[in-house]
Amino acid sequence: MQVTDSTPTRRHHFVFILVTLFFWASLYTYVPILSPYLDHLGATYSFAGLVLGSYGFVQILLRLPLGIASDRMKVRKPFIMLGMLSTTLSCICFAMDGHLGWALAGRIVSGIGASTWAAFTVLYASYFSRDQATRAMSLISLLTASGQLVGMGVSGYLVKEWGWTSTFWVGSVIGAAGLIISLGIHEPKEGISREPIQWSNLYRVMKEPLLLKVSTLSILAHSILFITMFGFTPSHAMALGADELGLTLLVFAFMLPHAVSNYISGRFLAPRYGSWTLVIIGFILSALCTTAISLADSLTVLVVTQVCNGFFQGICFPLLLTLAIDKIDREKQATAMGFYQAVYAVGMFAGPFVAGWINEWGGLKSGFYFAGALGVAATILAIIWSRAEMKLSAAQARKRNVTVT
C-alpha cells in the first residue's frame, strides 16, 4: 500500500485506541453502582427505572440524526469529541450534590455521548483497506468490551475506598483525558467512506422482513441486559449483603463470559450449529438464568447466575448483528445498521423503565421475572421466525433448481 500523508500510522492507531478505551471506561465506570446509588439517594424503583432508561431513550432520538449529520458533513472527529465531552459532563452531573435531578440529567447526557458511537466505528474503518473491514470491527468490538470491563471493574473499589461520588469524579477525569487525547485523532482525507444515510434508503431497508424481525429480537435482548447487569442486578446483590468489592466480583462474573461468548459465537459456533439455533439457545437459557436471579438467596448463587447469564446473553448479540444485514444489499448495509442500532435502543429504554414500575408494584424480584418472561417471548419468536426463514430458503433453492433445469 502506498504511504501518503493521510495514511494512518501506528501512532494514529494508538491514539484512537486510547480514546476508545477512555470513552467506554468513562461511560461505564459508574454503571455497576448506579442502581445502588439511586437507592442510597432514596429514589423509588419507578424513578430508578426512569434514570436507567433515559440512557436508551436519548439514543432512540439521536443515533440516526447524528449518524446522518456525520455522513452529510463527511467528518467523524468532531462527533467523537462531542462523545468524550458528553461522557465527562455526565459524570460531573452525577457527582453534583447527590440530588436525584442531577442523576437524571447525568444519565441523559451519557445517552448523548453513547449516540456518537457510530462516528467511532466509521472513522476506525477508514484506517483499514476495504478487505480488512471485518478485522477493524472485530478490533473495535474488543476495545468496547475492554473499556467497559475496566470502567465497571474499578467502580466497586472506588466506592469502598472513597465513597459514592469518587466513582463519578474518576469517570469525569477519564473522560476529560480522552477528550484531550482526541485532539490528536487522525481523520484520513482518503479511505473507506460510506454512502450517507438517505431517508429514502431507510424506508426501503425498513421493509426487509428479516431486519424487522431481528431488530425486534434485539429490542428484547437489550431489555433483558439493561434490566439485569446494567440495571437492577447490582441492587439485588447489595440486598443480599454484597459490599462494594462484591459488586466488582459480580461485574467480572458477568462481563468475562460475556466477552468470551461474543467472540466465539460468530467465529466458531455459528458455522457449526447455525445462527438461529444459537440465538434460540441463548435466549431460553438467559431467560432461565435471569429468572434464577430472583431465586438467588446468597451472593455466591447470584454470582453463578451471572456467569451463566453473561455467557448466554453474549451469544445472541453478534449473531443478531450479523442477521440484521444478512439480506441487505451491500450498498444499503450502513443504512440498515443505523436503523438497527437506533431500534435496539428502544430496549435500553423500555426494559429498565417498565421494570422499574413493576418493581415499584411487586418488589425488586418481580422485575427479574419480567425480564425472564421477555426471554421466553424472544425464544418463541425466534423459533417461529427461524422456521419461516428455513422454509423461505428451501423455496428459493427449489426455484433456483427449476430455473437451472
Image (cartoon, rainbow, N blue to C red):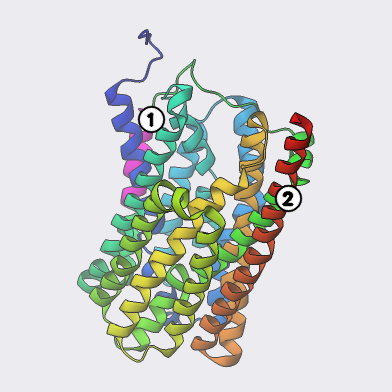
Which of the 4 quarters of the picture holds residue 349? Answer: bottom right
**Mark 1 — residue?**
183
* Mark 1 vs mark 2, CA separation in Å: 50 Å
Which of the 4 quarters of the picture holds residue 7? Answer: top left
Count numbered badges in the picture.
2
> Considering the numbered disc 2 on the image, is that residue within a helix, a strand or a loop?
helix
Is 147 on the left or on the right of 120, as rendered?
left
User: Taking the image as drawn, is residue 306 in sight?
Assistant: yes
Q: Which residue is drawn at 49% across and 15% down?
A: 190
Please state, as top left, top right, bottom left or bottom right, where the C terminus lies in the image. Answer: top right
Is 147 on the left or on the right of 269, as rendered?
left
Which of the 4 quarters of the picture holds residue 11? Answer: top left
**Residue 147, x across and y down, in percent:** 33, 50
Residue 229's place in the image compared with 386, above or below, is below
The foreground one among 140 and 53 is 140
Magenta span covers which residues? 173-184
- Magenta region, mostly helix, strand or loop? helix
Q: Residue at x 61, y 38 (%)?
A: 67
Please state, as top left, top right, bottom left or bottom right, where the N terminus lies in the image. Answer: top left
The foreground one among 133 and 229 is 133
